[in-house]
Image: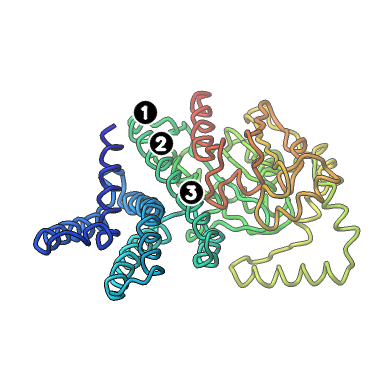
Amino acid sequence: MKKILVRFLNLILISVTVNSPFILKDLLLAPKIALMLFLGTYFIVFNILPTAEKFPTLRLKVLGGGAELILFFFLTCIASVPFAAISIAELVKGADDYGQYIFRFAVLILTEAVIFWNGIIRVYLTSIQLGIRLRILGLIFGMIFPVNLVMLMIIYAVVSRECKLESEKIKLNESRKNDKICETKYPLLLVHGVFFRDSRLFNYWGRIPAELEKNGAKIYYGEQQSALSVEESSKELAEKIKEICAKTGCGKLNIIAHSKGGLDSRYAVSMLGCDKYVASITTVNTPHRGCLFAEYLLDAAPDKLKNFIESTYNGAFKALGDKSPDFMSAVKNLTAGFCEEFNKKIIDSPDVFYQSIGSKAKSRKSGRFPLNISYPVVKKYDGDNDGLVAIEATKWGENWIKLYPKGNRGITHADVIDLNREDIKGFDVREFYVQLVAELKKRGL
């Protein structure tokens, strides 16, 4: 209740400030100057500290203040309409002193501009959820009335929700800090999927590793090349597993592997002796039964096109650090035909706990490029999918976790590893992994 009253008082005072030349025009000079000085001082303080609400981090404090400024800009613009309309009507009737009207509108425009730019700069510099698309749209439509007001409210809704969610998450992690619910017996090994590499600059797993570490997890990465056959990727992965166990003395690892990384992990365990070093494998949207659409693309694409894509990809990723990228072998190992033979040969180890996760998008609008393009193609050949992998193809092991969020959004192949750092309504990806790892801990793994 106190917050509501403070916000309401701020709104009244800022509305009076931006419209002060209209409201105070009939006052005597001395009280007018005194009030103008008070309102001017208040205006400066408000723009420095637009909200008294406490936030757990400086970034959220700046972001929350920006959201408040955007809201106040919108509301004070509405409050200014009657005053501006009256002055315009007076001018139409033939007012003599044009100078005072110019002054009134100049103060109104200047103060509103300060509130707006202060707010928009704050959120543009500190928001994660706005992304590139909303930032660009905000710039494009910023001067087009009334689309700019609609755009402004969309931006306000996004950043306000971000402030709330992040503040709640920080408080939740602080409340369970001593519990270390993700401190498993064996460390975690995160294994990336095809066409990506582990990078310190841009984490393939988004905000997930940091969230797990806040709750006690110890994390390592597969660091295999971006595109190789399953057999070759598995050799690199097996070396990494043995290296980590030898250096740390941890004995075993819990693998969480995304996409093709799940096939690489299964091969390493079953064929390369890593069953002695792995306690569990959790595959995430892995095509255990392959992708029919991948076979279609390989059959339909002209050889010249395939050779061009392969040489371009291999050349680019060699420049990025891969020693021997093999685009075509990686793609061929994702087909339904390959996976059928793979599953006959690769027998699960009885000493390793296997489980899997699968998700699906709701429509082509669910995902970002290129998943929004591939979704309808995969849908045609494989049915419900995440933009690349059919949900039925993800099932493997003792426990199959199916993710079906409410609403029309769905969860894509990228969303399930937080690649885009996007908060999805109805699915808290970071908390999902916290609880997933907490369950491994409960199993004694």
Label 2 or label 1, whichever comes before in sequence order = 1
Please report the residue visible at 88 percent of the width from the left and 68 percent of the height from the top. 303
Q: Would you say the residues marked 1 and 3 are in contact, meaning their CB atoms lie under 8 Å apart?
A: no
Question: Picture coordinates of residue 221 (x, y %)?
Answer: 53, 49
Local crowd at mark 1 within 10 Å, few (<14), some, or many (≥20)? few
- Please give the residue where the numbered disc 2 appears in the rendered image: 215
Mark 1, mark 3: which one is toward the viewer? 3
Rounded to the nearest whole Å, what is the CA distance between mark 2 and mark 1? 8 Å
User: In terms of secondary structure, where does tag 3 sit?
Assistant: helix
Q: Nearer the viewer, residue 353 or 144?
A: 144
Q: Would you say the residues marked 2 and 1 are in contact, meaning their CB atoms lie under 8 Å apart?
A: yes
In the rendering, which numbered label is found on residue 158? 3
In the rendering, which numbered label is found on residue 78? none
Amino acid bearing label 3? Val
Amino acid bearing label 1? Asp
Question: Picture coordinates of residue 187 (x, y %)?
Answer: 48, 39
Q: Quadrant of residue 323?
A: bottom right
Mark 2, mark 3: which one is toward the viewer? 3
Does 305 sit left or right of 106 as displayed? right
Where 414 sits versus 100, above or below? above
- Please give the residue where the numbered disc 1 appears in the rendered image: 179
Local crowd at mark 2 within 10 Å, few (<14), some, or many (≥20)? many
Label 1 or label 3, whichever comes before in sequence order = 3
Label 2 or label 3, whichever comes before in sequence order = 3
Amino acid bearing label 2? Asn
The number of callouts visible is 3
Does 84 sit left or right of 273 as displayed? left
